[in-house]
Image: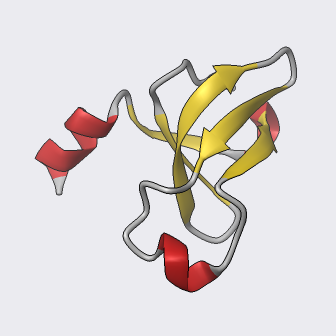
């Protein structure tokens, strides 16, 4: 299991993506507001995700922009 670091972009729960803002012992806090469709989804801007429930998509938001 790879554990994300602050600034990593992670994906979880049916394709939601966000930027890790804080690392905890068993989870990360993820900022979802960077998603283009964030307002359409009507979800909270921050969420907690257990380390077992995400995959790291990019090491940073800037790296993700280069891939897209």
Nearest the camera: 51 or 18? 18
Q: Quadrant of residue 59?
A: top left
What x and y, as percent, mark residue 46? 69, 48
Would you say 20 lies left or right of 54 here?
left
**Above or below — where is 9 with respect to 16?**
above
Position of the C terminus, as image quadrant, is: bottom left
Nearest the camera: 22 or 65? 22
The extreme right residue here reads: 26
Q: How many marks?
A: 0
Would you say 48 lies left or right of 63 here?
right
Position of the N terminus, as image quadrant, is: top right
Would you say 55 lies left or right of 64 here?
right
Q: Residue at x 55, y 18 (%)?
A: 5
Q: Residue at x 75, y 48 (%)?
A: 47
Nearest the camera: 50 or 20? 20
Q: Residue at x 31, y 38 (%)?
A: 61
Q: Residue at x 19, y 47 (%)?
A: 65
**Above or below — where is 3 with respect to 14?**
above
Nearest the camera: 22 or 56? 22
**Above or below — where is 54 with respect to 21?**
below
């Amino acid at each position: 299991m790879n554990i994300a670091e602050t600034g990593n972009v992670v994906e979880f729960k049916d394709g939601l993506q966000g930027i890790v803002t804080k690392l905890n012992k068993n989870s990360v806090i993820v900022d979802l507001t960077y998603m283009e469709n964030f307002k359409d989804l009507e979800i909270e801007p921050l969420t907690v995700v257990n380390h077992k429930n995400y995959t790291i998509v990019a090491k940073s938001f800037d790296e993700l922009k280069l891939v897209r």
